[in-house]
Amino acid sequence: PRLEIPDGTELEEAVSIHGGGVESYDFHALEVLQSIVEARKGGETGVEQVQFLDTDALFKAAEDGRWSVELAESAMQAELGKKPIDLKSFPSKPHGILLTYKDGFKATAVSIGGANRWNFACRLKGQSQIRSTTFNVGPWQNRCLFKALAHAIQHHFIHGRAPYPVERTLLVTGILDASMHSRHDGGKLMQTPELEFSYQPRDFRAMREMGSSWKIITEKTPQPAGIDRLTKN
């Protein structure tokens, strides 16, 4: 479903879900997360704590109230059409990255494998309703996402300014680095004073794919020849 979080909204918690492996896909799930939550009230304030958790530690943290399984289930429901019976039942073992932001906001990037998925859910402060969505990558797996990337690059060349705040990349890269150190140290909670920097979001809605492309390129559209170097297609 279409999801727009009004600029300046107070957010309480968010969960971003991907279906890939450690580090490489964690990075993209953090990008999905940050591209939405950075527009919360006050703008981005930075991250003060990062922790990588394997499957058992991840769900123990949920039991302790450190992150919301309910948000994760709602994010998965946006993709699947129904809530999953058990988040642990998917093909690969889940893992997660827990984030505590300087302004008290908290978020989690979770891997729930077995599919090419990018799901998101959040709870607005003072509201019980969960807002959730799934990012449709279109046919040909993730390859259609490069249309949006090419669009952003062209916009940058024409206007001489990135259409999104480049600080986002710095913050996400720093989060990922801290999470890998946490993983190496057995899930240690990492203090990240170097990530406690602020920035303001930019309106990059023109870069977003809101469904128009999928009216032209559908799941039945054949993949162009040569797009996949590993096959005859």
Image (spheres, rainbow, N blue to C red):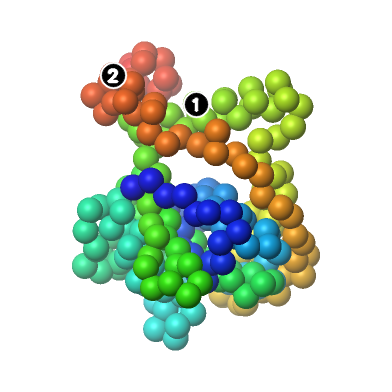
In-image side of 56 versus 78 (left or right): right
- Pick the quarter of the image with the C terminus: top left
| Up/down of 211 relative to 25, above or below | above
Going from N to C along the chain, the mark reached first, 2 or 1, is: 1
Name the disc covering residue 51, or none: none
Q: Residues within 10 Å of mark 1 (few under 14, many from 20)?
A: few
Query: Residue, x 57% and y 25% (percent of image)?
Result: 150
The part of the image, by quadrant, that contains residue 92 is bottom left
Cα distance in 3D space between marks 2 and 1: 16 Å
Q: Where is residue 207? Give x, y as percent.
A: 55, 34
Residue found 49% across the figure and 61% down from its top: 109
What number of labels is visible? 2
Q: Is residue 135 visible?
A: yes
Mark 2, other Cα within 10 Å: few <14 / some 14–19 / many ≥20:
few
Q: Secondary structure beneath disc 1?
A: helix
- Amino acid beneath label 2: Pro
